[in-house]
Amino acid sequence: MRMSRYILVGILLGFILYKSEAVSWFRIYEMFRFQSFHMYGIIGSAVVAGIVIVQLIKRKHIQNVKGQEITIKDKNKSIPRYLVGGFIFGLGWSLAGACPAPMFILLGSGYTVLFVYLAAAMTGTFIYGLLRKKLPH
Amino acid sequence: MKEILEQVLQFLSQPWPWYVAGPLLALVMFILLYFGHEFGISENFRLMCAADGADKYNEFFKIDWKSGEWNLLVALGAVFGGYLASHYFIGNAGDIAHVSSSTVQSLNELGIPVKQGSVPLIPDFISWEALFNWQGWLIIAGGGFLVGFGARYAGGCTSGHAISGLSALQLPSLIAVVGFFMGGLFITYVVLPLIFPIIR
């Protein structure tokens, strides 16, 4: 039953992104056309609040449920990996108008065609796994 | 009691403004950190590949996907959340996206016929019927493939880099977000005008 808390976190995530319209293809298009502050407001205020939270965690040495101090792993240093990988991700995000979390949310909302997106995303992940050693990281 | 519940339902059914959604996303990140995990939804694609037997083909998938069970449950919860929000928490205006008038104008110029005040949340080119056109395949399957490939190459998606990574002041995440935008701008300004309007 301890795992059910993760389902609750997911439900909260679903409500946030659905009710703020971040799951909408049109909102993503609007963001990339710089025609509204809405999406920038969501991501910007999430990051500002997130920075405050992370700084509090570090300075107050806040512990997690297991009683260990919360640590956040530094990401590996590289440029091509993040720039090229990010570029490819951005192509898909703006085409489908949905990143991974909205995809799961819309599946629940009844847009079952997103199973095609899910299968394609798993294929993309699988192909990346096969090519990983040949790609610059 | 019933009236209060109805008021709460109505209150939650309004469109949520950005200053509510953003801090709540940071809260989701904190809750997961508190439970001992890092927020990152696209990792689920790798876990699902591993669970489906991809570990036989490549060591990238030789992971204990059961240790990622928590993340799969977050994704499952998101499916439930989407169901609940879309079935019980729709405001009076209906299931619409409140995009700006300049966006409506740009969409019309592209050949997407939408009207201010009745722009649906999800366009009709994201549907099973849309798969009768090559554009539908490009948008839905092509988009999904690029998201799956790019997210693992970049080591994260919007949740892992744009929210968690930037919150932890990670330079790699900033580079990834710059990449997200370069890709998004390329599609929006160069590719979409080429694939619309969709003639049936």
Image: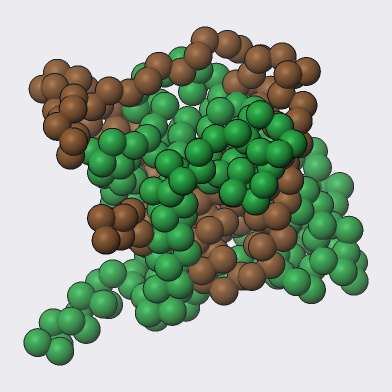
Q: Position of residue B134 (x, y in %)?
A: 89, 58
Q: Is residue B24 left or right of residue A86?
A: left
The residue nearer to you, when weighing B53 against A5, is B53
- Residue name at image x 40 percent, y 16 percent: A74
- Residue name at image x 81 percent, y 52 percent: B138
Q: Which quadrant of the structure image shows residue A78?
A: top right
Say if B186 sits above or below B166 in the image. below
Considering the image in quadrants, where does the N terminus of chain B appear? bottom left
Question: Looking at this rendering, what residue extends furthest in the front direction?
Answer: B56
- Tell me what hue chain A is rendered in: brown
Q: Which chain is green?
A: B
Considering the image in quadrants, where does the C terminus of chain B appear? bottom right
Q: Which quadrant of the structure image shows residue B176?
A: top right
Q: Position of residue A72 (x, y in %)?
A: 33, 23
The residue nearer to you, when weighing A90 against A69, is A69
Q: Which quadrant of the structure image shows residue B133?
A: bottom right
Q: Is residue B148 left or right of residue B38?
A: right
- Residue name at image x 72 percent, y 14 percent: A136
The residue nearer to you, when weighing A49 against B91, is A49
Q: Position of residue A40 (x, y in %)?
A: 45, 40
Residue A37 visible here: no
Say if B98 sits above or below B102 in the image. below
Q: Is residue B24 left or right of residue A118?
A: left
Say if A82 sits above or below B141 in the image. above
Q: Position of residue B13 (x, y in %)?
A: 33, 72
